[in-house]
Amino acid sequence: MSSSIYECDCGAKVRFPEWETNRSFHCPKCKKGIAITVDSLALKSVALSAGQETICPICQTEIEAQETCVHCPDCDLIHHQECWSEVGGCGTYGCKQASAIDKTETTSETPLTAWGDTKQCPACGEEIKSISLRCRYCKTDFESVDPMSAADLRKQAVVSDETENLKKWVVAFFVMSLLGCLAPLVAAVSMAYLLPKRAKLNRCGPLFVIMGWTSIGLSILYTVLLLLFFVAQEV
């Protein structure tokens, strides 16, 4: 079996994404969970032997004979296939196949939700975890874990473009502020442009905040020095 393409029971041929840490994955067509190893191989479903009793280490419930389950290739424990798919790996602590924390989807400030909660990606329409900050299908990033509509996504894109443009202007003002001869012009333009956008400037990050205020300060300083120079010349 290919390490990147898997044929689901529904007949769909699925290409696995490039894994970073979280291997949680469902068939985009039938939404059935697919249990995937650290080597990007899909585990084959197995059936319990007659009279065999076992507890899924993830959901801590007994696995019934008719339920689809998988064997961990490293610790050999049996899991519900859907449980393995949901958490992205083995439920045994320390096992090589255990799921790792996906930093693109969770942060220390992300609110925890119930196991199995999902939301719809506003970009591609696929079901993703409710705490996701990135769609694992189309790789779209979200500013918040709250469900978003297509309109919200467009608004986010507009804000992102405005932020990038503001960063470019900050860099331009900073460079021009280093040229003393342009100081009066830079002082007037930078203050007129940046002062009304203080809140947006703060969202650009500390580096651009420092560059923005420094450009204003330098241009004002050079303007004062130029005025003193001309006054001294007249005297």
Image (spheres, grey):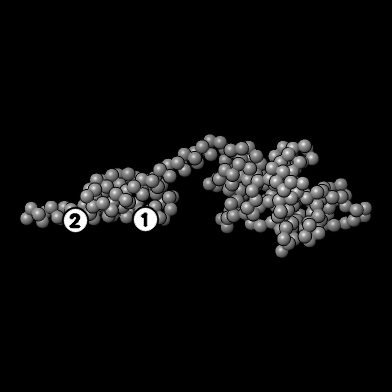
| Labels 1 & 2 near each other (Cβ < 8 A) | no
From where the camera sits, is residue 85 visible? Answer: no
Q: How many neighbours does mark 1 have within 10 angstroms: few (below 14), some (14-19), or many (20 or more)?
A: some
Q: Secondary structure at mark 2?
A: helix
* Amino acid identity at mark 2: Leu
Disc number placed over residue 225 in the picture, else none: 2
- What residue do we see at 71% from left, 58% from top? 98
Task: Depth check: give the residue in front, 119 or 170.
Answer: 170
Q: How many neighbours does mark 2 have within 10 angstroms: few (below 14), some (14-19), or many (20 or more)?
A: some
Question: Outermost residue, left direction?
Answer: 235
Looking at the image, residue 155 sits to the left or right of residue 17; the answer is left
Looking at the image, is 158 positioned above or below residue 38? above
- What residue do we see at 14% from left, 55% from top? 229
Q: Quarter of the image holding residue 231?
A: bottom left
- What residue do we see at 26% from left, 51% from top? 179
Counting residues from the start of the chain, the first of labels 1 and 2 encountered is: 1
Question: Outermost residue, front direction?
Answer: 2
Disc number placed over residue 210 in the picture, else none: 1
From where the camera sits, is residue 143 visible? Answer: yes
Q: Secondary structure at mark 1?
A: helix
Question: Whole-percent x and y of residue 202?
Answer: 41, 51
Question: Whole-percent x and y of residue 90?
Answer: 74, 56
Q: Distance of mark 1 from mark 2, alpha carbons?
A: 22 Å
- What residue do we see at 28% from left, 51% from top? 177
Question: Outermost residue, right direction?
Answer: 50
Looking at the image, residue 73 sits to the left or right of residue 132; the answer is right
